[in-house]
Image (cartoon, grey):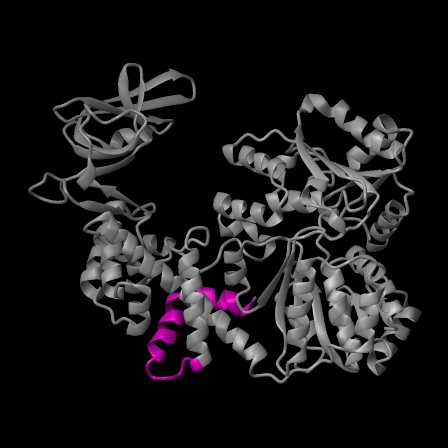
Amino acid sequence: MRLVDTRRAAALAKLGISSVGDLLRHYPFRYLDLTETSDLRTVPVGADATVVGRVHEIKVKHPRPRLTITEVAIVDGTGALVGVWFNQPYMEQRFAVGDRVAFAGTVLFDFGLKQMRSPFVERLDDERRGPGLARILPVHRATEGLSTNWVRRLVTEALEYAGDVPDPLPAAIRSRRGLVPLSAALRGIHWPETMDDASESRRRLAYDELLAIQLAMAQRRHHATMETPGHAHDISGARLAALRSALPFELTADQVRAVGDILDDMATVHPMNRMLLGDVGTGKTAVAAHAMAACADSSTQAAMMAPTEVLAAQYSRAVGPLLDEAGIRWRLLSGSTKSGERKEILSGLADGSVQVAFGTHALIQESVSFDHLSLAIVDEQHRFGVEQRLALRGKGEGIDLLVMTATPIPRSLALTAYGDLETSYLRQRPGGRGAEHVSTRLVPMSGRAEAYAAVRRAVAERNQAYVVCALVDESDATQARAATAEAKRFQQKVFADLRVGLLTGQMAPAEKVAAMDLFRAGETDVLVATTVVEVGVDVPNATVMIVEDAERFGLAQLHQLRGRVGRGDAPGEVLLFADPKTADGRARMDAITTTNDGFELAEYDLQLRGEGDVLGERQSGIPGLRLASLARDQDLLDASRADALALVAADPGLLAPEHAPLREDAVRGAGAAWEWVSSG
């Protein structure tokens, strides 16, 4: 392009722009609507508005050390307004008296004047020479050495050069979904005639982003379930019936549905690809046990992999007795398994006499082989790398896959991040324990004695308590309380007459198991821990939890931690010490204390923080989503998913001539998203 020299090319590269196509997809992040400007006399205080005027006066004030205030007064013949910037002295250089400018922001009234603090600024040419009133100006993200005006010029030239692009989306889909053609969408997103044009253009381009991901998901799902022969399991055998009879409680309606979903999948000749999403305490392991029993009835094996030894051991204790009742032989394999026992377990897995294996990463070591593995269960699967999940499934041919998570995920995120998996949900808690079984409240720093009294009451009633800290060890860089120091302080001062334990992720595996065994056996009254107890730890006797520096935790973490208490007959109580400094932090504390439904909290978290933070370790955002928002574009997500499934069902490789442009565009335009999906 004629406007791009070496210096501007380097600046564009910082924005991820290296081609004309990248420029076309460098969408505006806001608009300056000059068709809806307000005069300075009548613009209402408190409103978000766009105003236009000429610079009348520029002042830079220094009211005290390390504080600079830049004031730019504009007038329009009806009145005046002052733009105010704090500690941004360089703003003075952006203006000259007489400049015609637009300010966009919230109108305030202070010191007898209308003001905007740190407004968005656009310098306007005279009407006869450039953009004037009665048009909408796009505002693109810029970078050092490249102003918003230059980016706008470059994008405009890209539209002139290559804006009339062919549309790869089949006309039938465009018509059915009411989507504008691609070339119209690109022009409308950058230079809309009206804000409705901008909205319709965004809708089309957001649909394209979601469709690219859903096509990749649909293809991966088709490959996993339709192109590979699986095992048709016996779902009406004697061991499954015996396991059902051994259950000490009645399944909830959600559990019954989930068991039905899983067994129906396992009965087909196609491999199962299913995710079980359960809120805390909803009984995922009881559901998974039914799948294990179906394997035993089918003369095959099942393996359940957990992210930690603590969890693997706990699942073996919870499910093992049920399997014993059903006549199913099982073993636990972890990194700390003694060599003699390990040799025996490996032999049993290899000859098929061990029908169910619980374990950690130890299950995927090269030395582990199965006689006939037909089911892989991965718990808290987001804590494993892709290679580790594939390694377990690679221990056999056509293996059914059941992934489980106790981290509630919003429906839109589940369809996007795990769109290749069928989903089953658990929301109800067994045993008639509703969400109100656990109460959560904020405790002021002055209420520490009250919180400690709650711990003492619990212990007096032969119950136990957790104290959760964000840090393992104290740090000079933060005032947060650390687990090791708190455990020492409690044992020496606060709870000197009680038995205090410590559990952190930095302890050796054997030490962690020993600490949990003591707590589970009731030999520890107060367990001081980090988030190593966040997921899956089940001690029914624990009824009180104190969370230090709760504002440092995400909503999902706090909800998971809260799920560790009230798991028995006695109600649970969670006391949060927090001092949130931001509106976001205060909103999260309000949400966790007023809502006990994990899926409702997950939806709220998605609205509050976006998809980047909700799923945790696996992603800091979903590549390819520049315009689409999973929080507000549920209709587009549903539409793109339905269209992708139909397209792949009819043409799995998208190799038909009419689909080739769509595949090429999806791979090129959202290649990062496809790579991200393929690695998931």
Q: Out of 394 and 576, give the one closest to the viewer.
A: 576
Kindly indicate the quadrant of the structure image that contains residue 66.
top left
Q: Where does residue 668 sit, x and y in percent of width and height?
A: 38, 70
User: Is the magenta region chiefly helix, strand or loop?
Assistant: helix
Question: Residue at point 16% right, 32% down?
Answer: 99
Kindly indicate the quadrant of the structure image that contains residue 322.
bottom right
Query: Which quadrant, please, contains the C terminus?
Result: bottom right
Above or below residue 37? Residue 196 is: below
Q: Where does residue 399 sit, x and y in percent of width and height?
A: 68, 78
Above or below residue 602? Residue 382 is: below
Q: Out of 97 and 526, give the one closest to the viewer.
A: 526
Question: Residue at point 52% right, 32% down?
Answer: 582
On screen, residue 118 versus residue 479, left or right, reads: left
Residue 282 visible in the picture: yes
Above or below residue 532? Residue 657 is: below
Based on the picture, tell me whether residue 361 belongs to the magenta stretch: no
Give the magenta part as a residue range.
650-679
Question: Residue at point 32% right, 81% down?
Answer: 658
Kindly indicate the quadrant of the structure image that contains residue 303.
bottom right
Above or below residue 249? Residue 658 is: below
Q: Where does residue 120 sit, x and y in percent of width and height?
A: 29, 36
Q: Where does residue 469 sit, x and y in percent of width and height?
A: 72, 38
Based on the picture, tell me whether residue 669 belongs to the magenta stretch: yes
Question: Residue at point 70% right, 44% down?
Answer: 561
Q: Out of 521 and 25, give the one closest to the viewer.
A: 521
Residue 366 visible in the picture: no
